[in-house]
Structures are given as C-alpha cells and as structure tokens.
RNA sequence: GGCGGC
DNA sequence: GCCGCCAACATA
C-alpha cells in the first residue's frame, strides 16, 4: 500500500489532481475520502442499507464526492450537461461492476446499434452468430441461447432484444409465428418468465467445451470449432495481416483458443503486433466486448469529452475492494483529436486496464 | 435443443 | 397440433 500512494504521487500529483477514494463497506454501506488540491480533505460515510449492491454503493460514494468537489472547486459545472455524463461513464469504466444485479448500462444499447457493434467489438464467436442471423433470418436453439445471453450481457434491454430478433426472423416467417415460437424464450433469458433467473451469459470454457455446433449451427467458438481454412479466411477478412493470421493459427492449433482470441483482439485493435507476446487472456465473450468498448470509447471520448474534467482510474490499488479515482480539474487541450486521439498517458492507462 | 403438459 | 420451463456463473 506504500507503493500504491507512491504511484499516485508520481502519476497524479496532489496539486493537479483531486483524489477520491471510495470503499464499499460490508452490506453496501459506503465511504468517501477525498483529497482536494488545496490540501484539505473530506471524509464521510453513508448507510445504504442491506439491499444496496456493491456497485451502487461505490457509485453513490463517487457521486457524493464529486458533488463536494464540484461545489468547492468547480462551481461552474453544476448538475447539468457535463458532470452527469461523466458520472455515467465513470460507473461503467472505473468501478467494480456488479453483474449479479447488473444495473450496468441497460438502455444504452439499442437494436440498431448491434450491427455496428458486431463489427467493432464482438468476439468472433458472437460476430459469427450475428452474421448467420443476418443471412438465414433465423438461429437454431444453441445459437439463440449463446447469443441472446451475450446480448443481454452487453446491455441490450429486453424490448430491444425482442425487436432485434423479431425484425430479422420475420424476414422468413410471419410476426405471430415469431411471437408464438421465440418470444417466450427471449423473455425467459431475461428472467421474466418461469423461475425468473437472470442468467449469466456463457463463458468461454462452456462455449468451447459444451454443446459443439452441429451442421447448421452458428454457435460455439470459432477458434475451436471452425475449420482451419475457414478460420484463416474469416480472420484475414476482418483485417488481420498475414503474419497476424499465422500467429493466431499457431495458438489455435495448440488448442489455446482463448489465447488465440486474445491475440486476435490485440491485433484487431492495433494494440500489439504479430510478433509480440500475448498480454491478455479472454475468459468471457462479454469481457472481450467490455475491453473493446473501453478502448474505442477511450479514443472516441478523447475528442468528445467535455473539457474541464478528466477521470483516470489508477488500477494499482491492490488492497481490498477499495478503488480510487482521480479527477483532474485543469482545462484540457482544446483539440486533442488532431492526431487520432490518444496521448501516451492514455494509451498506458488503457493497456494497464486491459491486460492482467 | 431437451424436458414436461393437453 | 398448441403450450410452459430450463440452462449461467468472468472480474475488479
Ligand atoms: S475465445 Fe471465448 S470469446 Fe473468443 S471466440 Fe472463443 S468463445 Fe468467443
């Protein structure tokens, strides 16, 4: 814990950054401790009640802290416009997410974004199902399950999921046949029918091991279930270089699908080259998606983020469940976006966030 | 897809 | 033929 603070001092000097430490205490209570640039500190804790999730407790903590900060140091930015969008970004990117109650991101994603997202951020296994659905206007059971839960996991709301499957499926059947045959299952996966369980999307292990795709199925893991040449073709069609393809195939042939997938991620996002060591390990399709989004929105937001507040996660805090967030209060450069977006510092932070 | 009901 | 119900579980 000593070098944690050392790291903070080095990278985020106390006079330039406001430090906000939050901790979700047992049962969802939360505490805040903030160090302002003028040296003063704020400390406070709140009872949130037993029903409160870890996620919410931390969010509340940071909101509270930012409110104090805003009233003290940034009187110009009030409740509107700039601060709140940052907060929503905050909760998604810099806090421990709570998937069991997952208040995460619901409503942010709509059916018509899926095609775009499938190209930018879907892992191959899901991108493949998406493609199959576009072509066949239909998906077999296994694919519906794997894909449907994944979509829920990325934050697609139930009604949007229904819309997505309906608009595609009804290109090959009438609307009431669809409702009769498939709508129940979709609602069930969202925990709205029967036992009402909010199922966690399948992890890589399950996708690779259980229920191998038969002819006509689109599910499974491409790195395990695709024919070698078909996989090569798909990967290079997606923009991976010759060398990159070979590197990936090496892992694939060794049976290390999740490493191959990680390498694919790195190459497709341009954060490593074909010769360098693989830094990530993909354990869950939704993890692939989150990481991809983190990278992309990091770039996108560098040019869109309201100037004045910049938030960086110092993911060095090894202790307990504590997380720490620094808020920079200087004006940021007017045009960051001239050179494709990222400063070296941002790149470092992103890479730190993603690998492990 | 499986199980179950009529 | 009509219909309901089930499976899952990464991480900071
Ligand atoms: S490794 Fe996991 S995420 Fe990557 S493709 Fe296979 S299953 Fe999907």
Image (cartoon, coloured by chain):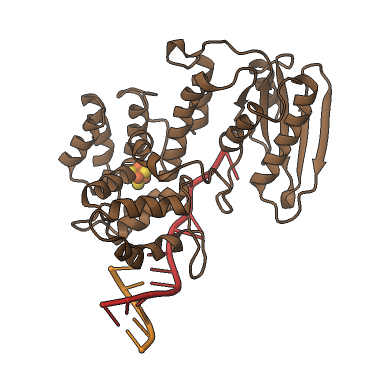
Chain colours: A brown, B orange, C red
Location of residue A306 with respect to A67 vertically, above or below: above
Residue A36 found in image quarter? top right
Whether residue A247 can be seen here: yes
**Image point (53%, 23%), residue name:** A349
Q: Could you say which is closer to the camera, residue A234 or residue A251?
A: A234
Q: Position of residue A165 (x, y in %)?
A: 34, 53
A204 vs A243: above or below: below
Report the quarter where the N terminus of chain A lies. Answer: top right
Position of A64 with respect to A157 (left or right) is right
Residue in the picture at 50% in, 14% down:
A343
| Res. A202 visible in picture | no
**Residue nearest the viewer, comparing A322 with A336:** A336
Instruction: Compare residues A111 and A42 and report the one nearer the observer.
Output: A111
State the residue at coordinates (82%, 18%). Answer: A39
Which percent across, then down, holds residue A298?
A: 49, 26
Examine the rendered structure and indicate whether residue A2 appears above or below residue A147: above
Number of on-image labels: 0
Indicate the position of residue A348 as horizontal and vertical percent values: 51, 20
Asked whether, in this view, residue A274 is left or right of residue A65, the answer is left
Q: Nearer the viewer, residue A347 or A173?
A: A173
In the image, residue A49 lies at what x, y percent?
76, 53
Q: Residue furthest front?
A: A175
Q: Quadrant of residue A340?
A: top left
Which corner quadrant of the figure contains ligand 1?
top left
């Amino acid at each position: 814990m000593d070098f944690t603070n050392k790291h903070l001092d080095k990278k985020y000097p106390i006079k330039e950054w406001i430090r906000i430490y939050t901790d979700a205490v047992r049962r969802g209570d939360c505490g805040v401790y903030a160090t302002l640039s003028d040296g003063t500190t704020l400390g406070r804790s709140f009872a949130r009640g037993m029903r409160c999730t870890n996620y919410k407790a931390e969010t509340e903590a940071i909101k509270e802290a930012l409110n104090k900060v805003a009233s003290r140091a940034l009187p110009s930015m009030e409740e509107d416009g700039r601060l709140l969008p940052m907060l929503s970004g905050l909760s998604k990117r810099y806090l421990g997410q709570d998937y069991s109650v997952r208040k995460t991101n619901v409503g942010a994603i709509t059916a018509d974004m899926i095609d775009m997202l499938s190209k930018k951020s879907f892992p191959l296994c899901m991108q493949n199902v998406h493609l199959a659905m576009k072509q066949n206007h239909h998906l077999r059971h296994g694919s519906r399950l794997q894909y449907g839960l994944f979509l829920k996991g990325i934050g697609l709301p139930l009604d949007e999921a229904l819309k997505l499957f309906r608009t595609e499926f009804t290109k090959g059947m009438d609307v009431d046949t669809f409702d009769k045959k498939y709508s129940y299952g979709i609602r069930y996966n969202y925990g709205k029918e029967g036992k009402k369980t909010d199922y966690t999307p399948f992890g890589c292990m399950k996708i690779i091991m259980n229920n191998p795709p038969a002819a006509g199925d689109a599910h499974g893991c491409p790195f395990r279930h695709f024919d070698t040449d078909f996989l090569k073709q798909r990967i290079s069609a997606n923009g991976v270089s010759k060398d990159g393809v070979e590197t990936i195939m090496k892992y694939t042939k060794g049976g290390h699908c999740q490493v191959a997938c990680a390498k694919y991620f790195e190459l497709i996002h341009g954060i490593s080259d074909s010769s360098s060591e693989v830094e990530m390990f993909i354990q869950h399709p939704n993890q692939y998606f989150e990481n991809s989004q983190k990278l992309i929105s990091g770039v996108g937001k560098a040019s869109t983020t309201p100037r004045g507040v910049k938030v960086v996660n110092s993911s060095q805090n090894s202790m307990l469940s504590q997380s720490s967030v620094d808020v920079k209060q200087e004006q940021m450069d007017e045009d960051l976006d001239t050179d494709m977006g990222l400063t070296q510092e941002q790149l470092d932070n992103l890479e730190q966030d993603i690998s492990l």
